[in-house]
Image (cartoon, helix red, strand yellow):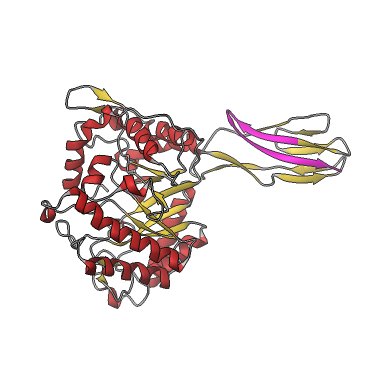
Amino acid sequence: MKVLTVKKLVITAVVMVAAAFLVPKPSQAGSVSTRAVWFSFYEYSMYGLKNQTEAGFTSNAKKIFKTIKESGCNTVYMHVRMFDDAIYPSKVVKWSDYIATNGSKLGYDPLKILVKEAHKKKLQIHAWMNPYRVTVSKILNPAKKKTINRIVKQVKEIINNYDVDGIHFDDYFYNSTSYKKVKAKTRRKNVNKMIKKVYKTVKKKNKNLLFGVSPAGNFEYSMSIGADVKTWMSKKGYIDYIVPQIYWSDKYKLVTGKYTKLFTERYKYWTSMNKIDLPMYIGLGLYRAGLKPDNQDKGWKKKNTNLKEQLKMIKAGNTEGYALFTYGDLTASHAKKELKNFFKELAWIRLNETKIKLKKGKTFQLTSSWYPARYSGSTIKYKSLNEELATVSSKGVITALASEGTVKIQAYCGKKTKNCTVTLE
């Protein structure tokens, strides 16, 4: 994630080799069945979730999930463990300073409220954890059995006490200089022991519970710090889904001075590695929209259609959705133009009914709207695909002209369409 600049510098240093990969095109049609957003630990204080009364916390949580829902998302990765801590009363780790100065005095369980309110909005909520991180520069030793046990105990604590939909790990594994002498192969071996144990723990509790990982978008970097994505995407029994953080644009400047389509190249490379058709959601760098984050990635400042083009690629490829980093940028002024174009590409038409029965001479009022709610698209129009059977007015009033048969009434705007099937009787 963008929180730590040290890792980002490392990624930038090694990412230049991306252009060398030649990969086949995805062969299956994609979807956006999962539309997720990360809610990071530093956002607890920013959006009124730190040191709050129970009423205040609940009220602000409702506002957050309302924004998420209106932005077209159906899943939220909620940060619950940041630095060997918890945003809930835990018997394994201490209270997180990011939820309260003194969590034991809160008098309520923040995670219980978050799960309840997310589900009220029909959002899936996954408990996002940094498994090893203790401080910015210190991690639990991945080679130690007690480290695995500690992580698994906290996973059990969450899935046994909260109705979460999944456990979600991000990209911080061997990201400490304290273990720089440990070979990459050994790092992957140690991390894999933990990943497999967590997977088994989650599945033992409920086979429908999900366990996913969000590795750094730079494949080589992920492998070097112990995230064995090659194995996870070629053998079952490790994870249920993967969310590579492909936060670059398609106007990335290499050390040679030439520009490369880095998002496209990385996207194709990640999908080519997916040997078991593991559900893959692409991590998108919403936080970079409209900004100039570094001297290499020029695209974010020069264009406001980066996310739109990335979404089109996701929809056309063998992937199942996306995750936006991060929540706060959904309403940030710097991302406004990018989001407008993104929502336009994402948006679909909703109807009050998609199947109706209608007697000859009778009418029915068909109404339509755009989703997500934050997209203010052009006016939706209507047409009958067989006017001998039924007609529809410009305001969506359907009139049955026959006593039998079926006809589709279409709501449309540009290339966006939604049909209502009318059965005449």
Residue appearing at x 17%, y 37% in the figure: 13
Q: Position of residue 345 (x, y in %)?
A: 48, 34
Of residues 253 and 69, which is closer to you in this image?
253
Task: Identify whether 52 is placed above or below 255.
Answer: below
Residue appearing at x 26%, y 27% in the figure: 20
Of residues 385 and 85, which is closer to you in this image?
85
Task: Identify whether 383 is placed above or below 187.
Answer: above
Q: Which residues are magenta?
A: 408-425
Q: Position of residue 342 (x, y in %)?
A: 44, 36
- In this orientation, does residue 331 appear? no
Of residues 145 and 327, which is closer to you in this image?
145
Residue appearing at x 30%, y 32% in the figure: 300
Residue appearing at x 45%, y 53% in the figure: 75
Quadrant in the picture for the C terminus? top right
123 in the magenta segment: no
Q: Position of residue 231 (x, y in %)?
A: 33, 48
Q: Main secondary structure of the magenta part?
A: strand
The furthest residue to the top: 258
